[in-house]
Image (cartoon, grey):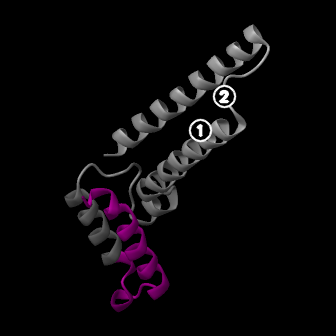
């Protein structure tokens, strides 16, 4: 899913850049543009809409280094089981009942939730 989003973004970006380049060439050759201002504005609106959707989708799958560090991981886990094991190890050390901090336990749970969203769907 994540790679599909990245590929989609680059396809949209390439289409936009090609259309802009073609429009620049038309303007240089003919001395004027065939697209009206309304058509250019509509094309920009559509591009902005798809870029915003991409940014929201990527934000969902973004993993912060601090979240990985809290769980004792150096890279993003490849499976949900690996993530669960990392959370369990971290919670065994940081759980308030074992002398750990409640704030750190909450941070570990939040980090787990954030990374686990990548595996939902």
Quadrant location, the C terminus? bottom left
Q: Is residue 18 above or below residue 99?
A: above
In this view, the residue in front, 75 or 62, is 62
Sort mark 1 into few (<14), some (14-19) or many (20+) by Cα contacts within 10 Å: some
Q: Does 24 sit left or right of 10 as displayed?
A: right
Disc nearer the start of the sequence (2/1): 2
Residue 14, position in %: x, y?
Answer: 52, 26
Q: Residue furthest right?
A: 31
Q: Residue furthest left?
A: 81
Residue 78, position in %: x, y?
Answer: 27, 48
As for residue 94 lying within the magenta part, the answer is yes
Label 2 – label 1 distance at C-alpha: 10 Å
Q: Which residues are magenta?
A: 93-121
Residue shown at the point (28%, 61%) measured from the top left: 83
Labelled pair 2, 1 in contact (Cβ < 8 Å):
yes
Residue corresponding to mark 1: 43
Residue 118, position in %: x, y?
Answer: 33, 57
In this view, the residue in front, 40 or 3, is 40
In this view, the residue in front, 11 or 35, is 35
Say which element carries label 2: loop
Residue shown at the point (60%, 43%) measured from the top left: 42
Residue 37, position in %: x, y?
Answer: 72, 37
Q: Does 121 sit left or right of 40 as displayed?
A: left
Which label number is shown at residue 35? 2
Say which element carries label 1: helix
Sort mark 2 into few (<14), some (14-19) or many (20+) by Cα contacts within 10 Å: few
Residue shown at the point (46%, 63%) measured from the top left: 67
């Amino acid at each position: 899913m994540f790679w599909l989003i990245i590929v989609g973004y680059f396809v949209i970006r390439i289409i936009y850049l090609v259309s802009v380049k073609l429009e620049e060439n038309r303007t240089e050759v003919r001395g004027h543009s065939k697209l009206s201002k309304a058509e250019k504005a509509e094309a920009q609106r559509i591009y902005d809409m798809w870029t915003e959707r991409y940014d929201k989708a990527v934000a969902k799958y973004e993993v912060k280094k601090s979240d990985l560090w809290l769980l004792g991981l150096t890279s993003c886990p490849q499976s949900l089981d690996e993530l669960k094991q990392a959370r369990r190890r971290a919670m065994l050390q940081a759980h308030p009942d074992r002398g750990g901090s409640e704030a750190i336990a909450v941070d570990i749970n939040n980090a787990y939730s954030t990374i686990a969203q990548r595996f939902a769907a």
